[in-house]
Amino acid sequence: MRIHTIHGVAVAAALACALIAAPSTADAAGAPETAAGPTAKSDSSFTLRGGTEGTDFRTLTVEGEDRVHIEFERPPLVVTLDPTKVPGLELGSARDALDRTTPDLASPCTQLSATEHSPYLGRPWLRQYASGAVARFRPSVKDVERWRLLVANSRGQTVATYQGRGEPPKEIAWDGRAPNGAPVVPGLTYSYAFEAYDRAGNKRNFAGQGFTVSAYRIDGPGGPTLLFAARDLAVAGDGLAPGGGVGFAAGGTTTRPVPIVLEAASAWNQVNRPRDPIRITAIARSRDAANALAAHVTPVFVAGLLGDPARVQTVAEVEPDAPAGGVVRIAPAR
């Protein structure tokens, strides 16, 4: 048997097969065989040293042992792999890696919004603010040469005037603005009168029933203007004075959700101007009532508003003929 120095597991397998297959008789030269077999000590050992090629073993017999231990060296594993030279691999920037895969930004936001309630979400189900016309008048008069419609507040002051010649329109819409463009105060009782003149100059007067302007909004280039009376807050059960009135205790504040205030914050969030200043004006019959109303509305509005809370300004005004409990105006700060 010829043994060559080959590193690897195959050496052990080949050598083991050669040892098992090797005959225990004399070699081809006819060396005599003793009756007791080859003389060997039970603890004898024989070493096959590697690194020497060309060594011939014609016969190799192992007796008195139940195992054969073969030792050989294994070459060190050296990995010479250069990632920059791998076929098909091209280096690029972080932008190139992002452009290869489109990030999914919607799924995490959708999952978060499904489990957590954010105070900044839009509330399209809230519809307590009227938009457009706050009142509509439908005169039904014939044979009219010229006409005039007057709208007055509780103090008898004219807050809107419409006039024309010929037949009046079927409907006259009032947007809630005074002659100077300022919005009128909701929660007060308003009245109107219609004057009609025929071709002979005869005048006919028609006085309508009083009506109340509810909460409404006016959209402008700087943002929406929202107005509501303090009685609209009583629907939520917040800030009620003892006895069920609509007054607010001085110094009393709350951040409990009030639908009409949250709708105002949601309207401003949809404007998408988180840096524009906003002014909350509380109008009441006394200074203490105005301050208490402002202190009640401002924390609720700020809690649902996007942007820096410092952009919200609070102003308290006193008007003797203000509605009972007061009125709130939320508008852009000019």
Image (cartoon, rainbow, N blue to C red):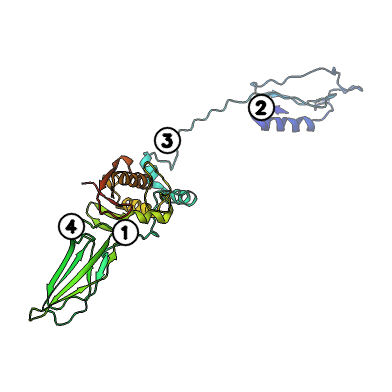
The label number, if any, that marks residue 4 in the structure image:
2
Q: State the image quarter where residue 33 is shown.
A: top right
Q: Which amino acid does label 3 sit on?
A: Thr
Crowd around label 3: few <14 · some 14–19 · many ≥20 (10 Å): few
Of residues 77 and 155, the one drawn nearer to the viewer in this rendering: 155
Q: Mark 3 points at which residue?
A: 84
Of residues 83 and 167, the one drawn nearer to the viewer in this rendering: 167
Choose the circle earlier in sequence order: 4 or 2: 2
Query: Which mark is in front, 3 or 1?
Result: 1
Of all residues, the one furthest to the right in this rendering is 35
Query: Which mark is in front, 2 or 1?
Result: 1
Q: Name the residue under label 4.
A: 181
Distance, label 4 to label 3, CA atoms, is 72 Å
Q: What residue type is labelled 4?
A: Gly
Q: Is residue 131 left or right of residue 203?
A: right
The label number, if any, that marks residue 215 in the structure image:
1
Crowd around label 4: few <14 · some 14–19 · many ≥20 (10 Å): few
Quadrant including the N terminus: top right
Q: Where is residue 47 in the image (x, y as percent from the top left)?
A: 73, 19
Of residues 135 and 43, the one drawn nearer to the viewer in this rendering: 135
Distance, label 4 to label 2, CA atoms, is 109 Å
Distance, label 2 to label 1, CA atoms, is 103 Å
| Above/below status of 255 relative to 187 | above
Choose the circle earlier in sequence order: 4 or 3: 3
Q: In this view, does 303 lie to the left or right of 226?
A: right
Q: Which amino acid does label 2 sit on?
A: His
